[in-house]
Image (tube, helix red, strand yellow):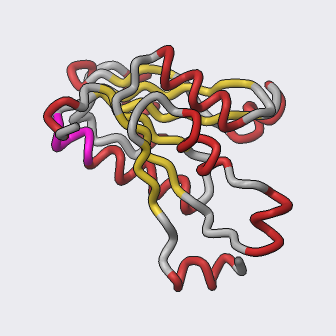
Amino acid sequence: MSTANWKRIMATTDFSPFGNKAVAYAHELAENCGAELHVLTVADNADVAARQGGATGVLEPADKDDERWAWLAELHGETGKVRRIDAVVIGKKTAEKIAEYAQKQEIDLIVIASHGRTGIKHAVLGSVTEKVIRSAHCPVLVLRPSAAETAKAGK
């Protein structure tokens, strides 16, 4: 699939540095393709969603004079060049919720960051990224942390 066909790109984030890296990369792709950007967070429950501070909403490039738009744009670091939809989904099965959202919203590309876990940490914690790759209806672009990022995070 060529980038010219990507109309809706989704990035997932858990607000970690790696998750934020996926959002920034997806934002750049969306700008280059003229695509809509969906930023999805999956939270275990409403309390967790509230603590994470994930504001939801739609940022339209044409609404730059709107005070709410300005507040959300500042919160998300949005430049206002693409239509951005921020969503929080509640559920414990993160990978399943990501795949469901992508299917319902007719997402053309999912951008997700891998935390780079290996060995016992990978076996115990599992891999949301792997599960998304297996269950998504569309291509999945995985961003891996650099060796320096992995070392810094203590993986």
**Main SS type for the magenta part?**
helix
Residue displayed at 21% across by 35% down:
81
Q: Please give left or right for residue 50 compared with residue 31 in the image.
A: right
Q: Please give left or right for residue 146 compared with residue 79 in the image.
A: right
Percent x, y for residue 36? 30, 27
Quadrant where the N terminus sits is top left
The answer to whether residue 5 is magenta is: no
In the image, residue 70 sits, relative to residue 147, either above or below, namely above
Residue displayed at 67% across by 30% down:
96
Which sits in the foreground, 46 or 136?
Answer: 136
Percent x, y for residue 148? 53, 85
Quadrant where the C terminus sits is bottom right
Quadrant of the rendered image containing residue 71: top left
Percent x, y for residue 13? 57, 45
Residue displayed at 69% across by 54% down:
127
Q: What span is colored magenta in the figure?
A: 29-33
Asked whether residue 118 is in view, the answer is: yes
